[in-house]
Image: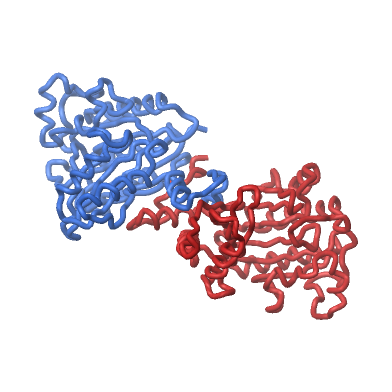
Chain colours: A red, B blue
Amino acid sequence: MAIVQCVPNFSEGRDLEKIEKIVSPLRGKEGVKLLNYEADKDYNRVVVTVIGEPKAVKNAVLESIGVAKDVIDMNTHKGQHSRFGATDVCPFIPIKGMTMDEAVELAKELGEDVARLYDIPVFLYECAASKPERENLAKVRKGEYEGLDAKFEDSNWAPDFGQAKKHPNAGAIAIGARKPLIAYNINLDTPNIDIASSIAKTIRHSSGGYRFIKAGPVEIPERGITQVTMNLTDYSKTAMYRAFEAVKMEAKRYGVNVMGSEIVGLCPMEALVDCASYYLGLENFSLDKVLETSLME
Amino acid sequence: MAIVQCVPNFSEGRDLEKIEKIVSPLRGKEGVKLLNYEADKDYNRVVVTVIGEPKAVKNAVLESIGVAKDVIDMNTHKGQHSRFGATDVCPFIPIKGMTMDEAVELAKELGEDVARLYDIPVFLYECAASKPERENLAKVRKGEYEGLDAKFEDSNWAPDFGQAKKHPNAGAIAIGARKPLIAYNINLDTPNIDIASSIAKTIRHSSGGYRFIKAGPVEIPERGITQVTMNLTDYSKTAMYRAFEAVKMEAKRYGVNVMGSEIVGLCPMEALVDCASYYLGLENFSLDKVLETSLME
């Protein structure tokens, strides 16, 4: 049986009543499992993780996108995270028994539905992108909600589905397909953001580091520390322990120590088991030797 | 719903056809899931892990014990692992929604059935033991198959079920209930068994080490190395990484290095995730952030 994961991000992180309305279509549906949702007040955004049978997930998420359009007004939305729509992004991640091409197909089906039913213009991104310059979400979203009118004047930015015209309160939406990623932050015992920034540069792909690390610096003023914040975009090729050890190794140059790390959102079991396997030097180990908790449910 | 795990060990590790016959009753039954079986040629033994609804698991394992009795002849059995029966040991481990007392009850029911249907004498061990000196499996099995006639002459060793007389080709069986354990071996880059033995002594409970480690030395002549072989009998209290780091620490005294380690049979996901969490110094982490593979089944 094919299983897809979907991680829609909605532009509401403060009003719990609205958030409940948005996730409500993801509950209690055959073939759909709502795994997690994490609202962030500063970002004013909620990240939802849902998993299940592809068509069932797509249809449930379509409903949530409809609710988000009805309860979110982008004209008054403020938050620290860039965004251009009530449902801002909606990636599909093939998990089991399906190919990336099939996830792309699912993204396109959802895109068609969203444009047709809700009059929201849709951009396809990452593996679903219709041209190379739309692969990178940051480029697609550039200008944010407030810049949509200008964006649509540029014929290069005609949406993949729907009219070249923003929805009056829901803006636009980026729908895509991608590999699973891990949002991973490593804490440094220094308040000096320049050090975090220098370390981030050494490990990230864009400036010469590991192929599947995106990284930047973050200040955590209330703790007097800084973070190297990362997306591990293919943990099967750039492992979590490798990012961790690389940051430790670079921090030495500044006499700085790694204090620990944190995972934001969900983390695939394989990535963690791989870390245990590395640090314990496990021989002859494979995932089928792991007795999962949910096997017992 | 109550879930029990059962890990029967059968005295056949070479003849794949016989092994298939033995595990066959554990396949395709409602409420029973065969998770894993690992045959070891040197030990001439197969360790089977099955999980599911208590009565269903008990009945399926009962069938397998019957098959083992039919296809294994202990009179010609040779192997490096101590053993006294065709089905040598059969522990039940309460996993979910059941108490240890209920697992003990299940062990007793299986014991009665085995004695009545197959004429195999049954010893209850660990939490199911009828007296303190039967708790330790090593003591129950002492003398092995070849010593059974002598054992049954001693009235202290009357079986818990069945006659005080070995089955002519299947010997005896130890049936019990226990907590989940991890069979864990750590490899040392020395052929000197005395060093492995000294290290084992420092970490095991019986000679002053960690409360939930049983350990001993093993030689791996074909690799020119030795092992500290362990049972971690409560990984929630004596963690796997702790055993690993303790062996590393002790090995230093002899100028010996830890080369790696191995897990025999299945390992609960929590134990591995805990290792990843320790080595990565994860903050704010909990098991509900792990995206399990089988959630996707």
In the picture, the quarter occupied by the N terminus of chain A is bottom right
Residue B237 in sight here: yes
Nearest the camera: A217 or A82?
A: A217
**Image label count:** 0
Nearest the camera: B9 or B249?
A: B249
Query: In the picture shown, does residue A42 fall above or below B104?
Result: below
Q: Position of residue B257 (x, y in %)?
A: 26, 56
Residue A239 in sight here: no
Q: Position of residue A149 (x, y in %)?
A: 88, 70
Q: Is residue B85 left or right of residue A19?
A: left
Nearest the camera: A244 or A124?
A: A244
Where residue B62 sits, quadrant-wise, is top left
Where residue B216 sits, quadrant-wise, is top left
Q: Residue furthest bottom?
A: A155
Query: In the picture shown, does residue A158 fall above or below B41?
Result: below
Where residue A178 sits, quadrant-wise, is bottom right
Q: Is residue A118 left or right of residue B58?
A: right
Nearest the camera: A158 or B1?
A: A158
Q: Position of residue B121 (x, y in %)?
A: 22, 28
Residue at point 62% right, 57% down? A5
Residue at point 32% right, 48% down? B264
Q: Position of residue B176 (x, y in %)?
A: 31, 30
Residue at point 87% right, 55% down? A76
